[in-house]
Image (tube, helix red, strand yellow):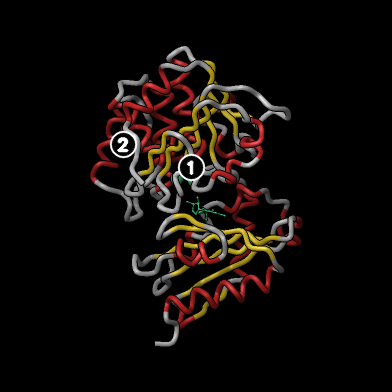
Amino acid sequence: MTNCTFAEINSALRENERFAVLGHVRPDGDALGSQLALALSLKQLGKDVRVWNEDGMLEKYSFLPRAELLTKPPAGPEDVDVAIALDTAIQNRLGTALEVIGSAKIWINIDHHPSNPGYGDLVYIDSTAPATGQILFELIKSERLPIDHAIAENLYVAISTDTGSFQYPNTTARTFEIAAELVRLGVDVGSVSQQVYENFPRRRVELLRELLRTMRFEGKGRVASFSLSLKTAAELAVIPEDNEGLIDHLRAIRGVIVAVFFEELADGKVRVSMRSKNERVDVCAICQKFGGGGHTLAAGARIRGMLAEVEERVLKAICDVVDCNS
Ligand code: AMP
Ligand code: MN
Ligand code: MN
């Protein structure tokens, strides 16, 4: 499937009036930063813009410039000319926002997930981009869309969070060039980094303590996992956003190739997060076997079943790929 051009997206943006800018459920810094950045650029063009995420703005990203623009979708249907899905590999991961928009004339899909099937009318998927925020920067630059300090900071957070603070292998020279341009636009690296990485509520570290108690290793230490039951989550009074990134503690262990986090959900499913440290071990392919998706090195799925039972099924599927016996 071939991408549309930035020029085609640009025309759709400039020639229409009412927009909805959407991102995936359980949003991360890339989804929220990208949504706000594009929405702000559209607002500067004088457009009528809604910015909706099923989960609304997360507490930990509420420092993002103009964070108040991003809300939960309304209860009833609303008419827009253009709906834009950002950072969303599967259309149903737009959640309730999808139900609100019945009548959009044009759907734009901008993403960096290789598993994205290319839903929508104008599709731009660049799986080499480390973040949707990086694609948006290229779009804004090439089409001379408005950019200012607030937009730059949102894009910086999008790129910083999806590259693991410029550490993951998807970080390229271009990523640093873009980061430099964003810093020149006024992003204060120290202050933004502190807000993203050094401002967690204490309960997140208490959660980490409990997760580490459940830590287990398979396959000669190549597969590490931990899990969170509904009971523990309730006892610690954690909220879903608290666990973003905790899986990195497993990934950081020497010898670990695949890290897995299992989270029991209230709807009878288990949310599985997976990370790989080896390009030859494609966790997206493993997650796709369970109806999920993502990237080669970072993927996820929601699997129906009891926590312990899902753990065993998933760990076995990983061990089959990682060759845990040699
Ligand atoms: P997470 O582990 O939730 O941080 O997600 C890692 C990557 O996998 C992200 O790029 C997600 O977009 C993708 N992903 C997570 N969960 C799912 C899912 N249920 N279906 C498809 N992709 C997913
Ligand atoms: Mn994301
Ligand atoms: Mn992303």
Q: Quadrant of residue 3?
A: top left
Few, some or many residues within 10 Å of mark 2 (<14, 14–19, 20+): many
Few, some or many residues within 10 Å of mark 1 (<14, 14–19, 20+): some
In the image, residue 50 above or below residue 178: above
In the image, residue 2 above or below residue 226: above
* Direction from residue 239 to residue 212 in the image, left or right: left
Q: Amino acid at mark 1?
A: Tyr
* Direction from residue 161 to residue 126 in the image, left or right: left
* Residue 221 drawn at (x, y percent): 46, 78
**Quadrant for the C terminus in the image:** bottom left
Q: Amino acid at mark 2?
A: Ala
Q: Which residue is mark 2?
A: 179
Question: Residue at image x 35%, y 67%?
Answer: 278
* Residue 93 drawn at (x, y percent): 58, 45
Q: Which residue is mark 1?
A: 119
Q: Secondary structure at mark 2?
A: helix
Q: Pick the residue in front: 265 or 302.
A: 302
* Residue 253 drawn at (x, y percent): 43, 69
Q: Quadrant of residue 20?
A: top right
* Direction from residue 186 to residue 66 in the image, left or right: right
* Residue 106 drawn at (x, y percent): 49, 28
Q: Which numbered disc flags the more N-terminal residue, 1 or 2? A: 1
Q: Secondary structure at mark 1?
A: loop
Q: Are marks 1 and 2 in contact (CB under 8 Å)?
A: no
Which numbered disc, 1 or 2, marks the residue closer to the eye? 1
Question: Residue at image x 71%, y 69%?
Answer: 306
Q: Quadrant of residue 315?
A: bottom right
3D distance between C-alphas at marks 1 and 2: 29 Å
> How many numbered marks are there?
2
Q: Ligand 1 closer than 8 Å to the CB at disc 1?
A: no
